[in-house]
Image (tube, rainbow, N blue to C red):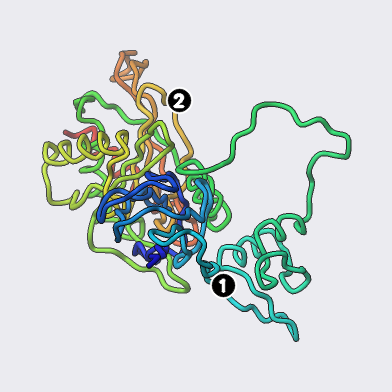
Amino acid sequence: MAYEFKLPDLGEGLTEGEVARWLVSEGQEVAEDEPLVEIQTDKTTVEIPSPAAGIVSQILVEEGKVVPVGTVLVVIGGDGAEPVPSPPSDKVSQGAKRVRATPLVKRLARELGVELGSLQGTGPQGRVTEEDVRRAAPSEGPSPGHVREGRREPLRGVRRLVAEHMARAHREVPAVTWVEECDFSRVDLKLLVPTVLKACAAALQEYPELNARLEGDEIVYLDRYDIGVAVQTEQGLVVPVVRDCATRSVEELRGDVDRLADAARAGKLKPEELRGSTFTVTSAGKLAGLFQTPIVNHPEVAILSIGRVAERPVVRGGDVASAPIGYVAVTFDHRVVDGARAAEFGLAVIRRLEAL
């Protein structure tokens, strides 16, 4: 008897996932609990084991495709000739006409400004497909006769998720960035990130509106200090979370930062290690410019970045001296945080770093 494996609910309110990589092929025998497929969510890549043993008779969703939870991904067992249910769909009322479309297609239509009721679906049972929506979308593409140039790659995996996340943050958050210089003479630069985490957690307790999120018409002030740390990997930027930054020592935080960064670069972060941050810190290290204007990590309301720390001239007591100077930038959601409060928070972080 055939077993139809559907994309499971992976938690955190996720409604869809991308098939990042198949770990089996059609005709292959798979054992129960053997790795089956890697699914990319907006949090991380999850390896899903096979829930059943048997021959992989049909793979129904190709790598790189994004599908809603409940979609049949693969059939295990049987002879591969059995009819497979179509992916779950929604019936969307458009006046007198009812339109069949998946949640993913509905969202795409909203983003592209396409009226679903105006489309003739080409999918099974008249379902509107992603291709139907994209064909109907207003286009500002190249004019007829234009020659397409360059090597092209689909936007997928972590890079697709980063693009979607950044676009949403840019679209929804009225962001402002404040910048000030900081003297890092007292900071062990080998402990820069955990030291900044500790300083931020302490300052956030004084300025709780930066450790918050906006939900509807309510500002939710959080009483935990779980800070995300942006890590660049070969697949793109990921933000694992360092927990309890207010109560733990710099050395303890360093252990977590190193462990999470190594796991991020190896692609082995657990889903729970990417969830629930209340604030984010980013440092581009040796690649940093003087300062950055980082994008707020939605649904948070603020992010702090550290620019390149280097020996620069400073004036002390009327004399010119040299000191390791770097720029601290705070980008914040102006709906929740006033400019003066963001500046006071940034200065509170700098005071702690300069007073170690």
Kindly give the residue lying farthest to the right in the view shown: 145
Residue 42 screen position, x and y as percent: 43, 53
Q: Nearer the viewer, residue 35 or 274?
A: 35
For marks 1 and 2, the one nearer the N-term is 1
Residue 98 screen position, x and y as percent: 69, 81
Q: How many marks?
A: 2
Q: Secondary structure at mark 2?
A: loop
Sort mark 1 into few (<14), some (14-19) or many (20+) by Cα contacts within 10 Å: some
Instruction: Answer with left or right where residue 248 lies relative to residue 182.
Output: left
Residue 24 sits in quarter: top left
Residue named by callout 1: 89
Q: Give the residue displayed 76% in from the left and 55% down from the top.
A: 135
Q: Secondary structure at mark 1?
A: loop
Q: Is residue 78 visible?
A: yes
Residue named by callout 2: 289
Quadrant where the C terminus sits is top left
Type of residue at label 1?
Ser
Asked if residue 250 is positioned above or below residue 149 in the image, the reply reads below
